[in-house]
Amino acid sequence: MQLATIGPRRRGFTLVELLIALVLVGIVGASVITVLIKQQRFYRSTGDMVETRSQIRQALSALPSDLRSVSSAAGDIVDMSATSIDFWATIGSGIVCQASLPGAGGLQDVYLLPLGSETARFTSWVSEPKAGDRIAVFDQTAINFTAPLALEPVGGGVVTMTPPAVACPASPFLTLAENLLDRPRLQVNVTGATPAAAGMPVRILRHVRYNLEQAPDDGQWYLAYRDFGTNGLTPQDPQIMSGPYQGPEADGSTGLAFAYFDANGNALPFTARTQVARIEVVVRALTRGSTPGSGSTRADGRLADSDRLIVGLRN
């Protein structure tokens, strides 16, 4: 009987080898985790900066669109400072299709062409006009818009939309078929030294303000827009446009800054509202929260970005 040959006994790992292997695995694992944490911080800070720059773009697209329609010479700027601006913004335009003769106190009924007319697409507005807005009528002799006429309250304090049977029954701007359509015309009561007449272009203006407002829920600062009620004087609740932005700092800087210049490029005091030809706007936005390890130089660890533009006003 032949016995099976037993091979050499295999040698296992020693305790020292196991310890060395565990140490190496730990070093490699720690290195991988460190890289992942850095990558996570990088992507987080990048995402925060992308969002911040998006907020800046929103601000710098909204402000110029309103400011470019402002005429300082016509008194459109109501108030201006280093951190806010009040002005009469153009919210719409149209063509007078019918106007009554001025009555007592210069009061007139004025009708504008309806929205969406096929033969004359002259009427448009961002939001429907209301009492407290103004209408500026184009004066052909002066090749300019007159001083704005005030929109007076009509029937319960609001501007009314009247049926076609009331407004412009024989308008030269509309076909007979369009006059028969159920498209409401805008009817407003206005008062002013210059009466409106059929065919006159008009601009519809609203008193608005842009400034920074601190939100009560998170304490951060946001670009806010507000209009001024049915009388053009009472500020309404702010509408948040974008943000957050840098709040007032100890050095006097803030997240929204305005500077005003005349036609020759000279800086103007805040009282020279009728001489403004250009407005410089600077915005400084912040990320919503701190990003550790992102390289922020701010004490709160938040990242910041800024931009600047200069807007030329209408003559």
Image (cartoon, rainbow, N blue to C red):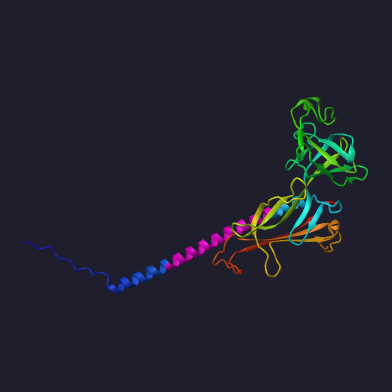
Work out whether 108 lies above or below 177.
below
* Residue furthest to the bottom: 16
Q: Quadrant of the rendered structure where residue 260 is? A: bottom right
> Along the line of sight, which residue is nearer the eye, 153 or 312?
153
Q: Point out the image quarter for the N terminus.
A: bottom left
Q: How many marks?
A: 0
> Along the line of sight, which residue is nearer the eye, 167 or 314?
167
Q: Position of residue 271 (x, y in %)?
A: 83, 61
- Image position of 286 (left or right of 229): left
> Along the line of sight, which residue is nearer the eye, 199 or 87?
87
* 274 in magenta: no
Q: Position of residue 116 (x, y in %)?
A: 75, 34
Q: Residue at x 83, y 27 (%)?
A: 169
Work out whether 215 lies above or below 129.
below
Residue 195 visible in the shown view: no
* Residue furthest to the left: 1
Q: Residue at x 81, y 25 (%)?
A: 176
Give the main secondary structure of the magenta stretch: helix
Q: Position of residue 71 (x, y in %)?
A: 83, 51
Residue 95 visible in the shown view: yes
* 46 in magenta: yes
Q: Quadrant of the rendered structure where residue 20 is? A: bottom left
Identify the magenta region.
Answer: 30-58
